[in-house]
Amino acid sequence: MLTTKEAIALKIETTQGVEAAPDPSADAILVSELSYANEGLRMVERPLIKPTISTEQSIFAGTLKKLTFTAEMKGSGTAGVAPEIGQALRCCGMSETIGASVIYQPVSEGHESCTIYYYQDGRLNKIIGAKGTATINAEAGGLGTIQFEFTGKDAGRVDANFPDLEYNATVPRPFIEVPFSIGGYDAIINSFSLAFGNTISTPGNVREVDGYAQVEISKRDPNGSIDPEAQKISVIDFETKFKNGELMDMTTGDVGNVAGNIWNVSAKAGIRDISAGERDQRRTDDLTYGAHETLGDDEFTIEFK
């Protein structure tokens, strides 16, 4: 079974935990760096006292499944049409607003769940009731990517051949010619990251066959990092902004310039730490930040246009 021959399809559920049957011709996501493992595995030990020093076999008492994958940051090819990763974003505690562009923003209730079909080379693994978190990464001269991490209930596995898979043909744009700014300052950065920071809760439930209740998103702490080139204090004083707890408008600016394949990320950033860094013998101010709300659920937005 080749690791180079795998695929996923993801579809939002009408009712959490009720299989949504993703359509590989409509719900497939082109991904890399796939990982699939048990989450919260319970193997009950039996510390019995016996005449011998051997260990009793542990008893399986339920598990959830975790699936992680990386996708490209790119549009659908048509302005106002959700990107290929749209359903995945919604199941990471995000709302979707479709107009001239498509905007994703955190919400605190009504979180959607999904069914994920994970196709291996001759095998199909199913996860239901899944919710997750994600991290956006972009570096100069590379592609913007988003790493998803989903936790859900194990819906079994079967032998299965690959179905007819169809992916969006849009080619992503590199992270260059980007007008990044923070606090109104046009910073020169090399890399940018934003983690959604969702806490995935998996409470126990004796009524369930796996011993777990439905997966929920119970908390959010968006955060990330940037590495602007250091400047004189008269140009930008990040140290004072850090100590004063100043919230700054931060945006990547538009990545790409063709309608239907443009994206940007904006956040209300407060510096959490600052340290002296270096990039090709140039001093940098390496900043970690938190994204914080001001009017409620407005810490950050992701826009495709």
Image (spheres, grey):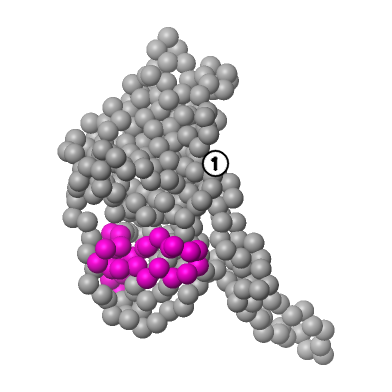
Q: Position of residue 107 (x, y in %)?
A: 49, 43
Q: Is residue 173 above or below residue 188?
A: below
Choose between 272 and 61: the one closer to the eye: 61
223 is higher (above) or lower (below) than 275: below
Dividing the image into 4 quarters, which one contains the N terminus?
A: bottom left
Is residue 290 something that shows in the picture? no
Residue 113 appears at what percent x and percent y? 47, 59
Q: Amino acid at mark 1?
A: Asp
Magenta stretch containing residue 189, yes or no? no
Please provide the residue range marked out in magenta.
2-30
Q: Quadrant of the image for the C terminus? A: top left
Residue 105 in sight here: yes
Task: Tell which residue pokes out farthest to the bottom in this image.
Answer: 51
**Quick check: is 22 in the magenta stretch?**
yes
Magenta segment, principal secondary structure? loop
- Image side of residue 282 versus residue 79, left or right: right
- The percent position of residue 78, horizontal first and vertical second, equals 20, 46
Provide the residue designation for mark 1: 221
Say which of 191 and 11 sits in front. 11
Q: Which element carries disc 1, helix, strand or loop?
A: loop
Is 89 on the left or on the right of 154, as rendered? left
Query: Residue most toward the top?
Result: 234
Q: Residue at x 17, y 38 (%)?
A: 258
